Image: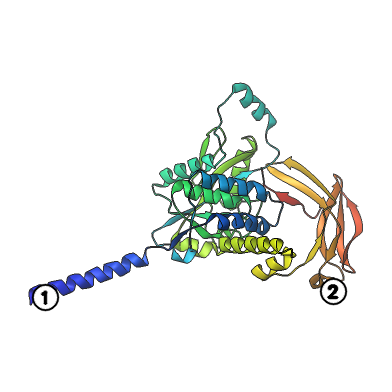
Amino acid sequence: MKSHFRHAFSAVAAVLLSVSLNAQTPKIRTLSEQELVDMMLGASIQASRSSNTASTVVRIKDALAAGKTFKMVSLEDIPDNWTTISESGVGGGGAWQYVIERTRQQKLPTIRNQTGETTVLAAKALSKYLGKPFNAVVRTEADGATISGLLLAADLGVPIIDGCLSGRARPEVEQQIPWIVGIPASPAAYVSRWGDTVIIDHAADDYRVEDIARALAVASGGGVSGVMNPMSAADAKRGVIPGALTQAILVGRAVREAVAQGKDPIPAILNVVHGYKLFHGIVQRDETWGERGFTWSNACGPQEIGPSLSGLLLQAIFVMKPAKDRCRFDVVRGRQLVSVRTYRKFSLGWFRDSRS
């Protein structure tokens, strides 16, 4: 009788252990080359800014040819004991030129960063500092951060989460969901092209993380690679936008298929994202310059306004600056953007982009 009871108890324990292990084993899948190529295109569209899709496609294909594999996991499937991390490339124009010139004269060795080596160094530095490994990577933003996140995940041997901290591209660190819901970007780590490694143990807030990282970029030839937002699974599930990478794949596929069929890809995109068209047109002029660690741009071009905005009597769309001392305010009037008036030395805002 006792023997029978022991066997029954062991069987029940084995079943419970199996259920527990299965509950903590996430469903991870390997992304195909076509999915990755579609993701690069879709991520460029998600970015809502200028993008270089051809370059990211070449990089992802080169990585596949080099034997890298890219795996993805759903946000809802990550185990409770996992810790996630996000890559954080910061940089743009306006670097200290004298530092660039001096380091060239010194012939300081630089780190080859074709496949994200400095980001991996930053992740390893932060992992060592925190005394824990990272189990998954979360994309920081759309566009170039997509491939950066994928490469970091592949090099760490972990999956990338099907999600994003911000959904689109953004110029500053604090412009993301974790900061809104009270999850700090620090601790964070940044590595320069020369291998300088900086750990931000604590920052007053995410604005200060942005300030410090931007200062490092300006002092380091225009950019630094880094990681930030180490999160528990619980924090990730409230601070990450789920499904962002799947959406990028679907958008990219919709465009690819529409173009192959000779169709307009815009309706295909709107169908995937459940969006609507505001306006369209051609940029007639663009000015770009570097300043304070950012790349700044002025764009100018009258647009055709969609029906969703055509009923508005006055709706500001762009703030444009064709010259350094003036801005043009364009508004909707009769489904066309028209110039209303010009103010000198006055600006409501700028298009700003942090690409290096």
The residue under the point 57% across, 60% down is 245
Image-quadrant location for residue 256 = bottom right
The residue under the point 57% across, 35% down is 193
Quadrant where the image shows the C terminus? top right
Q: Is residue 155 above or below residue 276?
A: above
Amino acid type at mark 2:
Gly
Indicate which label's residue lies in the foreground, 2 or 1.
1
The answer to whether residue 210 is left or right of residue 30 is right
The answer to whether residue 2 is left or right of residue 213 is left
Res. 81 in view: yes
Quick one: label 2, few (<14), some, or many (20+) residues within 10 Å?
A: some
Image-quadrant location for residue 111 = top right
Asked if the residue under mark 1 is in contact with the one under mark 2, i.e. CB atoms within 8 Å, the reply is no
Q: Nearer the viewer, residue 143 or 258?
A: 258
Amino acid type at mark 1:
His
Q: Nearer the viewer, residue 307 or 261?
A: 261
Please tell me whether mark 2 sits on a helix, a strand or a loop: loop
Q: Which residue is mark 2?
A: 311
Which mark, residue 4? 1
The answer to whether residue 260 is left or right of residue 338 is left
Give coordinates of residue 105: x percent, y percent: 63, 22
Give coordinates of residue 349: x percent, y percent: 77, 54
The answer to whether residue 27 is left or right of residue 3 is right
Taking the view exactly as shown, the residue that stands out farthest to the left is 1
Quadrant where the image shows the N terminus? bottom left
Which mark, residue 153? none
The residue under the point 32% across, 64% down is 21
